[in-house]
Amino acid sequence: MLFNPHTYDPAHFDAETRRLLRATIDFFEERGKDALLQRYIDRVWYQDFLDFAAKEGLFATFMTPAADAAGNPDKRWDTARNAALSEILGFYGLDYWYVWQVTVLGLGPVWQSANTAARESAGRLLDEGHVMAFGLSERSHGADIYATDMVIADDRANGTKYYIGNGNVAGLVSVFGRNDQGYVFFAADSRRPGYHLIKNVVNKQMYVSTFELRDYPVRQADVLHEGQGAFDAALNTVNIGKFNLCTAAIGICEHAMYEAVTHAHRRMLYGKPVTNFAHVRRELSDAYVRLAAMKLFSDRAVDYFRSAGPDDRRYLLFNPMTKMKVTTEGERVIDLMWDVIAAKGFEADTYFDKAAMDIRGLPKLEGTVHVNLALILKFMPNYLFNAVEYEPVPERKDAADDEFLFRQGPARGLGAIRFHDWRDVYDKYGHIANVAIFREQADGFCQLKIDGEQYKDLDFLLSVGHLFALIVYGQLILEKGADPQLLDEIFAVLVRDFSAYATELLGKAATTEEQAAWALAHVRRPVADPERTAAIWEQVLALVGAYEMRP
């Protein structure tokens, strides 16, 4: 299940994609663990990685849509291979992933734009090895795009942006602002006069800038979008770029798991390996199973992104799921392992102590949980009750350009999106004991009645959202498919999680007596199976020494 640099062979990709992914792995492996950790501790800007990416054409190949590739057959926007690269970068360090991630975001408004000159300029910058930035957030407003203090008047932009990755070196910064006619997205250059870099706002290797534009010239040739189009471009860029949060979390957890399981098994306590203790086996097995679920869901979500079109926008539910659910599961995976390795998880010469800090940033800074849960709830009525027929979505590892992602259209109408019947795949796997129990809980959720006033209580609704999210999570895990014992163990976890969220709903002040009775009625115990538990533990033990980065 886990990415292993020593055995990784993405045979499903084309030759140039395989070469670039292997070259990226080799770049980090040749430097070794000690060098990477020391650069992290010393907060050294990763110019060596950017030089490597420029030399190999990594970002230019992976981030240039086919329409802007000038006939280069290797360039395309391919969500499957982008997800693979994102996982690899997360595996070696969130900072390396971040410079890639922010470049994806910075390019979003450009590739959605009809401004041919700006698109050609972005393509040249990528070929030259530049990175990009996404100038949306402001200190007073966060990422609230309804309010911006970046103002364009008399063809000059003035204002300050905050929390903008790559703002120290970006060859192109897609800046969101407004003029007297409404919203505007325009391209800026961190090297031009009028662009004033203030500082790095985080104590990290990555550069998360605040910068000010002072009478920065904005020509018509710099304008990417205006009016409602600028607003839509901002939200659609998030749909494209923030999906990468899930694979970053997966990569971080995979590296940390190799380290944690290997340490725990080799650690002797009272004359026997730590992994002989029942509670340690449970926690490590739980972490492994949760990580497997993260991978299965995210892999299947890629297929929906790649198969999306004007008449199939189901990916807009699965995107906030990856930002919220997969990343918070990443936190749980790290915490479970940390309970086992304890003090080891604080030591400076481990990858784990970096993972333990960095995993927090994905759901908290990049994909705020309560915002994404509120977004997920918009889809709930149609998802649960108004299914329609769709052609089955195949596995998408083909070398195709995902061009629809840059013509998503107006960022509205989420509540009108329809879904295929989620029950179908649950029926297919109903013979698996814990899938059947979870299906009972999911069917019961459809009977939960919410009063009108409760829709105004976000604290109450967030608990409902967590329950609903589990149903969606389980659906894509089953659609991806896996060994029946692994699926059974995954759904044992989901049964426990559903019971926990039902108990949380029980305790809410806004919960009615009827809802409290429903919550108690849907607390379930998963089916235990010693043979299954032993088989999963063998998969965990197989990680011992399977990957150790050279010093």
Image (tube, rainbow, N blue to C red):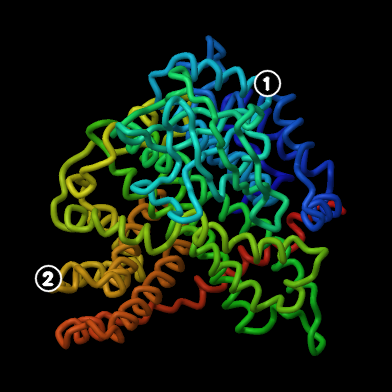
Seen at 55% across and 18% down, the residue is 121
Amino acid found under the numbered disc labelled 2: Gly
**Which residue bears the numbered disc 1?**
128
Which image quarter: residue 128? top right
**Coordinates of residue 84 in the picture (x, y in percent):** 57, 40
The reply to whether residue 449 is visible in this rendering is no
Badge 1 crowding class, 10 Å Cα cut-off, few under 14, some 14 to 19, many 20 or more, is some
Asked whether, in this view, residue 514 is left or right of residue 324, the answer is: left
Whole-percent x, y for residue 219 in the image: 47, 20
Please give the residue where the numbered disc 2 appears in the rendered image.
Answer: 452
Whether residue 54 is situated above or below residue 299 in the rendered picture: above
Helix, strand or loop at label 1? It is helix
In the rendered image, the quadrant that contains the C terminus is: bottom right
**Relative side of 539 to 547, left or right:** left
Residue 253 in the figure: left or right of residue 230? right
In which quadrant of the rendered view does residue 5 lie? top right
**Residue at the image point whose x is 80% and y is 89% from the top:** 270
Amino acid on which disc 1 is placed? Glu
Residue 378, relative to residue 108: is it above or below?
below
Q: Earlier in the sequence, mark 2 or mark 1?
A: 1
Closest to the observer: 152 or 361? 152
Residue shown at 77% from the left, 54% from the top: 40
